[in-house]
């Protein structure tokens, strides 16, 4: 039985230009629509992206979009990449939504690359999913495998069967691409948080990397997702009560370095030096050190761990031009120093999640049973220890008066991605309640 949702023959209509105005709106909307068997229509898809709404405002996949230069890393040192930024569905959206349409037997219109309006009306719930193994392949190397996962994850999490068998997804696409989480971020930050805080276990294996920089490549990852048992809801497991400042003190930084082999030592030395200046009492461990195989491919992820078990991460993806006025060592020093400073700024907020994790877990907070709180820490008075969540998801202690948020538009603390995620979730799960600018969420206790 579904809890916390109401079905209607009238579709929920969302304007894709709202808030972040990118692909996030359609990913969350269709993912939750597939889960809850609600019809949804998204108009003006990715309408805030450069290039406007495309020629004529229609859904033609062939309309022309202007190519805009994106400078990766130090402007004078890196290759200018011309990337077409335009409105409408991209290959990774079509790959994930086509899979959702297939497994839900959905009626769709506008499900093709370039479409700016999508109608999605699913007919079959996750519990009807009989197959346990699937392949999802993006149409281009630049299509993010991790963003494909974001769209299909809500549905798969509730696709349990009587034998409690996992669902295995072979996803082929980009694992290290711009404007998307890297595989390392998923492996070291998102997946552990899902398990620790929501009891969701995802086995994962990276077979091949896929980049949208340098030579063509198609990545491949295999995910073994263990759905929530039938009849049960996701439960939030709060961390032990944090003490300030002890629980927020950084004790270790993990680094993943995927750069040309000849620069491994230089990058390691620069990271150790920069992190040592910012976190003199923290150790540095190199979790991944790989040869990227090309000067067009540089990927570095830093994950800070606190004494209280909090994780914060920052990463960088860039290219180095063949001809540049700056020295190679100078570029490396600048890139490493800048990344370490960004990490330090994030950890200094004293939140319990980082900027890029916060928006990815909003849908789970809304689906879970009871209260949850995972603030980023933009406003310490409202975010840090705003509420004490009991072991069974009850709201044990408020440090201040709870204030119910309105959800008719993007709202609350956090990045534009986070405020937009709350709005979309509120439209699809209206029974979910948000308090104190999104710092606390009361989920609907969804189950099937």
Image (spheres, rainbow, N blue to C red):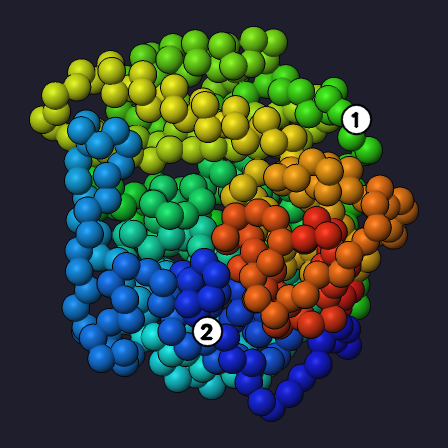
User: Residue 9, relative to residue 270: is it above or below?
Assistant: below
Q: Residue at x 56, y 56 (%)?
A: 419
| Crowd around label 1: few <14 · some 14–19 · many ≥20 (10 Å) | few
Side of 214 relative to 272 (left or right): left
Labels in figure, total: 2
Pick the quarter of the image with the C terminus. Answer: bottom right
Q: Residue furthest right?
A: 396
User: Residue 54, relative to residue 344: is it above or below?
Assistant: below
Alpha carbon separation for disc pair 1 and 2: 42 Å
**Label 1: element kind:** loop
Instruction: Give the percent coordinates (x, y) of residue 69.
Output: 19, 47
**Toward the viewer: 287 or 324?**
324
- The residue that disc 1 covers is 243
**Label 2: element kind:** strand
Q: Residue at x 12, y 24 (%)?
A: 324
| Crowd around label 2: few <14 · some 14–19 · many ≥20 (10 Å) | some
Pick the quarter of the image with the N terminus. Answer: bottom right
**Toward the viewer: 432 or 193?**
432
Q: Residue at x 47, y 33 (%)?
A: 314
- Indicate which disc, 1 or 2, sits on the residue closer to the N terminus: 2
Instruction: Give the percent coordinates (x, y) of residue 356.
Output: 52, 43
Instruction: Give the percent coordinates (x, y) of residue 146.
Output: 45, 51
Q: Residue furthest bottom?
A: 9
Side of 357 relative to 70 (left or right): right
- The residue that disc 2 covers is 15
Instruction: Give the percent coordinates (x, y) of residue 115.
Output: 32, 75
Residue 96 visible in the displayed image:
no
Residue 83 visible in the displayed image:
yes
**Toward the viewer: 50 or 261?**
50
Side of 62 relative to 121 (left or right): left
Side of 299 relative to 283 (left or right): left
């Amino acid at each position: 039985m579904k809890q916390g949702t109401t079905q209607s023959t009238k579709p929920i209509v969302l304007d894709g230009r709202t808030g972040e105005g990118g692909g996030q709106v359609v990913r969350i909307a269709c993912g939750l629509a597939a889960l809850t068997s609600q019809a949804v229509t998204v108009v003006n898809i990715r309408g805030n992206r450069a290039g406007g709404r495309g020629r004529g405002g229609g859904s033609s996949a062939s309309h022309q979009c202007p190519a805009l230069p994106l400078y990766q890393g130090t402007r004078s040192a890196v290759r200018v990449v011309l990337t077409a930024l335009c409105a409408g569905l991209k290959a990774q959206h079509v790959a994930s939504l086509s899979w959702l349409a297939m497994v839900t037997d959905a009626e769709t219109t506008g499900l093709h690359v370039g479409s700016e309006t999508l109608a999605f009306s699913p007919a079959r719930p996750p519990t009807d999913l009989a197959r346990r193994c699937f392949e999802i392949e993006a149409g281009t190397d630049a299509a993010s495998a991790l963003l494909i996962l974001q769209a299909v994850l809500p549905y798969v999490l509730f696709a349990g069967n009587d034998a409690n068998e996992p669902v295995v997804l072979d996803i082929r696409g980009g694992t290290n691409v711009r404007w998307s989480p890297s595989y390392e971020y998923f492996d070291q930050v998102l997946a552990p948080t899902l398990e620790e805080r929501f009891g969701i276990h995802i086995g994962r294996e990276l077979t091949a990397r896929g980049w949208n920089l340098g030579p063509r490549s198609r990545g491949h990852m295999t995910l073994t997702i263990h759905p929530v048992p039938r009849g049960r809801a996701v439960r939030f497991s709060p961390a032990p009560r944090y003490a300030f400042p002890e629980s927020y003190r950084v004790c270790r930084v993990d680094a993943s370095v995927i750069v040309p082999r000849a620069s491994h030592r230089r990058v390691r030395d620069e990271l150790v030096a920069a992190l040592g200046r910012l976190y003199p009492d923290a150790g540095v461990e190199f979790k991944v050190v790989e040869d990227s195989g090309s000067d067009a491919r540089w990927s570095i992820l830093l994950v800070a761990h606190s004494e209280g078990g909090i994780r914060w991460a920052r990463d960088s993806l860039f290219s180095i031009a063949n001809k540049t006025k700056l020295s190679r060592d100078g570029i490396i020093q600048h890139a490493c120093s800048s990344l370490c400073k960004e990490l330090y700024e994030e950890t200094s907020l004293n939140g319990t999640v980082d900027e890029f994790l916060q928006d990815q877990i909003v849908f789970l907070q809304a689906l879970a049973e009871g209260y949850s709180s995972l603030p980023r820490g933009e406003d310490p008075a409202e975010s840090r220890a705003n509420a004490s969540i009991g072991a069974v998801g009850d709201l044990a202690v408020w440090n201040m008066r709870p204030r119910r948020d309105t959800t008719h538009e993007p709202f609350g603390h956090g990045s534009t991605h986070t405020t937009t995620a709350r709005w979309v979730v509120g439209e699809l799960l209206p029974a979910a309640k948000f308090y104190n600018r999104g710092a606390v969420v009361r989920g609907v206790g969804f189950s099937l």
